[in-house]
Amino acid sequence: MLVKMKNNNRFVRFPKQLTEELAEFIGAYYGDGNMCGAKKSDHGHMFRIDGNLKKDKKYIAYLADKIEKLFGICPSILFNEKASNIYLKVYSKKLCEFLHTNLGFKYGDKGVLKLPSEIISQRGLLIAFLRGLFDTDGCVTYQKVNNKKYVQLKITTQYKTFADEIKNCLLPFGIKSHVCWKCQDPKSGGSYDVSISCKSSRTWFEIIGSHNDRNIDRFKELNGDVKI
């Protein structure tokens, strides 16, 4: 079950400024990341990002490499075949404290998400953040109208205020979207989709793009018979 393990706090380093690589990592955390303090984990402070074993294996490896380049510490990559789940983990008090103090990462429940002001104010950082968010909490799908399929991109979040923020920050890029509520599980209270229109889906991939083969391959597949 354990794929690789090279954690050593002696090699932890911290970025001195907010770069596009760091912004993309933050976006991935906003999507499928979580962090635990010593009281919540038997092994101490821990950071992890989850994915689908069948669809996100290469992307999790990509994120693990990015984390190693950013912080000098190599995550453990583990998987659960029965649950079709893959995830990366880092056990490091130093790293978790840095993420909490400097980047606002929360222990346990992330709470109501809000786009960081430093990221919104810089185009390159915002693009990188949105890419990381899309590659973890987004998908490529389609809408069928009059027997024609139209590509659609979706980013899912639990919070409407965050969905509205995403929608508004996409407008300067010429990317049109709308926010809609969906309820898959009444107990969870449902969630919100930021749905990006057919024509804007191409603009997304031209400007923001993706580092997750799951999204790239699906977009190429649908574009074979999809009107853009």
Image (cartoon, helix red, strand yellow):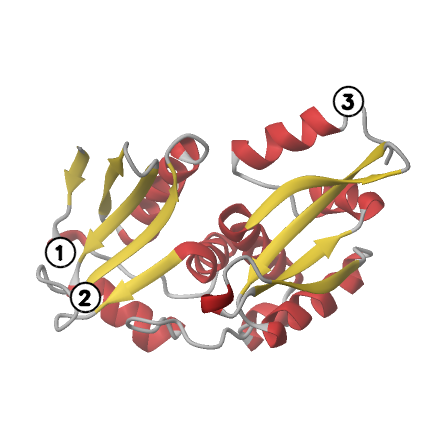
Which disc number belongs to residue 60? none
- Quadrant where the image shows the C terminus: top right
Residue 179: percent from the left, percent from the top? Answer: 71, 65
Most foreground residue, 201 or 6: 201
Among the two numbered marks 1 and 2 on one chain, the one whose residue lies closer to the N terminus: 1
Residue labelled with disc 1? 9
Tell me which amino acid carries mark 1: Asn
Q: Residues within 10 Å of mark 3 (few under 14, many from 20)?
A: few
Distance, label 1 to label 3, CA atoms, is 48 Å
* Residue at 14% across, 64% down: 41
- Label 1: how many Cα within 10 Å (few below 14, some 14–19, many 20+): some
Coordinates of residue 19 in the picture (x, y in percent): 48, 59
Position of residue 127 measured from the top left corner of the image (x, y, whole percent):
63, 55
Mark 3 lies on residue? 224
- Secondary-structure class at tag 2: helix
Q: Quadrant of the N terminus?
A: top left
Q: Position of residue 21 (x, y in %)?
A: 47, 52
Residue at the (13%, 70%) spot, across then down: 38
What is the CA distance from the residue labelled 1 to the residue labelled 2?
7 Å
N-terminal-most mark, 1 or 3: 1
Q: Which residue is mark 2?
A: 94
Q: Are marks 1 and 2 in contact (CB under 8 Å)?
A: yes
For residue 10, which quarter of the picture?
bottom left
Question: Which marked residue is nearer to the observer: mark 1 or mark 3?
Answer: 3
- Residue 87, relative to residue 182: is it above or below? above
